Amino acid sequence: MKEPVFDINSITVEKLDQFRHETDPLADQTVKTIIESGFEKQINQVFMTLVSNETYDENTFSKFDSGLAETLNDYFQQSSKLPTWLDPNKVEKGERVFSLYGPQIFMILNVSSLPMCYTCAKGAQVLYETGRLMAHGGNTDPLARRLMETAQMIINVMAKGGVSAGGAGVVTTQKIRLIHASIRYFLKSGQFGTPWDVQKYGEPINQEDLAGTLMSFGPVILSGLKKLNIDLSDEEVDAYMHCWKVIGYCMGIQEELLPETFEDGFELATKILVHQAEESEAGKELTKSCILFMKNIVPGNSFDDVPAFMIDYFFEDLSKASDKDLSSIVAVGSKIDLKDKIVLSVAKFVTGLIGSLDHSEFVRKLTSLFNRALLQGIIYHFNDGKQVQFNIPPSLQKDWKIVENWENDWTSPEIFKKRLTIQKKIYTI
């Protein structure tokens, strides 16, 4: 029987409703087997093992009970298969796009991709219920951790060799699938409070939600780069889309939801927004937390109004395509109202921002300041004594002009005219 392929015309409301009740059978069955075989108490140890290992081999789970290790090894072997249609040349060209425009991509991720996901009320509810993205009482650590995980995932899959056999990106997607399956299991069993209402929301982290998130990393990023006047060739656009099609496959997304072209991907994102975007407290709180994170992560307060401005700006094309005011859905202020405040705040950096610039030119000038400040803030935050470090491969550090330095962290008293110094690694842009 021939495998189903993507056809944008087959993506109807009825089909999207169906996808809301479909998940990831392989990962779900693995988690179910682990828990129902009496290994539930070892779940946290399993995930700690996954976090501390960038690679996988047959000895990764050797310290666990043989039955648990066998279940995990079976899953990792089955989920490691790459698609037969993977084109190494396209993947390499897509990786090159990422190496050239990584700082801009990370900014668009925070001000467009993730907020777009929050506009989808039912999908946002999963994030809200688990609490992994919430910054309770102004505490951004849970949010920072989740954003770090997302940023690290993107680096792992898009860095050179990430989606090759045994690559860091493939292993990362295998881990994420297990995390998603665990969230589904515990949400539906009431571990986070009231059992998940499948009839109202669909399955947690279902195929439609997964596809929408994938589109936010693929065509939505490409649309954002275009708004920044970054003129990619058709070949580069196709290559970047191909990378995310491969990643989607590795993430357990059905091929019926994996477009190859930018046009089909943007239309799929639009159809999902038409189907799912609506106001919710979850979406508003998540967006509020994301903005708070960016405010806290960027040094000083000159850029405090920039995240909301950027979200509204980058939502323009999606709002027009879906005929929904996405900014209002997540309670973000108008860029027109924010522009004057931003000009006054950042004028000391670039006097050219003052004047009658149109919005697109204004954003391009503003972006050159903000995306570097944001990436610098992320690097400092995640690598300042945290247990899990934000790892940027040397090749990308070079492309993004990130310099590795060592800074004294502690120095002992002088003994015989000598001192012992402990240093920590820091990065500067």
Image: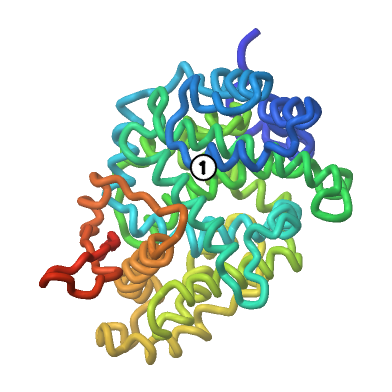
Disc 1 residue type? Val
- Looking at the rendered image, the quarter that the C terminus falls into is bottom left
Closer to the camera, 21 or 237? 21
Label 1 crowd bin: few (<14), some (14–19), many (20+), radius 10 Å = few
Up the image or down, 88 lies above or below 251; here it is above
Closer to the camera, 264 or 188? 188
Identity of the residue drawn at 53% across and 46% down:
266
Specify how the rendered protein is coloured. Answer: rainbow
Q: Residue furthest front?
A: 416
Identity of the residue drawn at 39% across and 46% down:
155
**Residue located beneath label 1 in the image:** 51
Q: Position of residue 151 (x, y in %)?
A: 45, 52
Q: Position of residue 213 (x, y in %)?
A: 58, 47
User: Which of the 4 image quadrants contains residue 348?
Assistant: bottom left
Closer to the camera, 413 or 128? 413
Up the image or down, 286 lies above or below 296; here it is above
Identity of the residue drawn at 21% across and 65% down:
420
User: Which of the 4 image quadrants contains residue 85?
Assistant: top left
